[in-house]
Structures are given as structure tokens and as C-alpha cells.
Image (cartoon, rainbow, N blue to C red):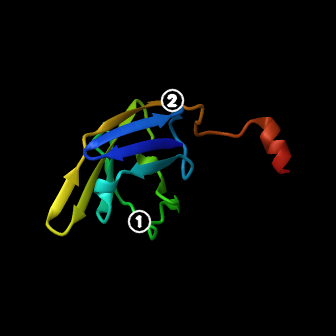
Amino acid sequence: MIYVKVNGQQLESFSDQIYSDSVNYLTVRFDFFDDWKGYAVTALFRHQSGGTVSLVLDDFSGYCVGENTYLIPYEVLKTPSFTLSLIGVKDNSRITTGEITFAVKQSGFGEGEAHPFLRAADS
């Protein structure tokens, strides 16, 4: 899990090591300070290859897994890193944050034939 404190335009993060190729596993939990109250928030996840995934942070999102906790889109979980920034909108007001970067190490996942021990277990 990644934990992100959101204070004004500043993001501060805490996380364990992140590995590539996980799907519907890694989450981010946001702790918003009062200045974000009432804002509709969108998270922007960017991989350095140029891919960006915009995620609306609300309870109705298919990515929401708990209070202020969301799955990180698997598309950005690639080496060597991805970034996160936030945009909040309320009436005629907009808050933006800087980007924070998360290093991603290569996992042991690979496409191919299953190990013989695993194939025997499926029989």
C-alpha cells in the first residue's frame, strides 16, 4: 500500500517497495487536509512511456476499495517509475499538486509455460 498525505498543493508519500506487473492489488490511501474538503478530486497516474490514467476519487469508482483508498491502475505499474498528482475542483476553484514519483522494480512475473510442479497440481 502507498499512503499519501495531501496538504494544500503538497503531497507526501510513504510506501513499501513497488514491483511491476501486479493487477488489482496495489492500493493508495489518501489523507486529505481540510483545504480539500468539498472538492471533486481526480488522480493522475503517469508512466514515463507517456501513458496517463485519470482516476476520479469517489466511492462509485470501480477502483475504490475503502475510505479514501483506491486501486492503482495496473497500466502504470511498469519499470522504472510512475508519477502521481491530484486535481481538485469546486465551483470556480481548482487545486493542483506537484507530482511525486514512485520507483518500480521489475517483478519475477513472465509469460510462458507453467513450471512442471504447478502443472501437476492442476491435474
Q: Quadrant of residue 98?
A: top left
| Percent position of residue 5, x then y | 40, 43
Looking at this view, is 19 or 85 the one in front? 85
The answer to whether residue 116 is left or right of residue 8 is right
Q: Which residue is mark 2?
A: 106
Q: Which residue is mark 1?
A: 58
- 61 vs 116: above or below: below
Tell me the residue at 51%/60% (across/down): 67
Count of labels in the image: 2
- 19 vs 40: above or below: above
Tell me the residue at 48%/60% (across/down): 63
Q: Amino acid at mark 2?
A: Gln
Tell me the residue at 23%/62% (across/down): 89
- 70 vs 121: above or below: below
Which numbered disc, 2 or 1, marks the residue that appears first in the sequence?
Answer: 1
Pointer 1 local density, CA inside 10 Å: few below 14, some 14–19, many at least 20? some
**Quarter placement of the N terminus:** top right
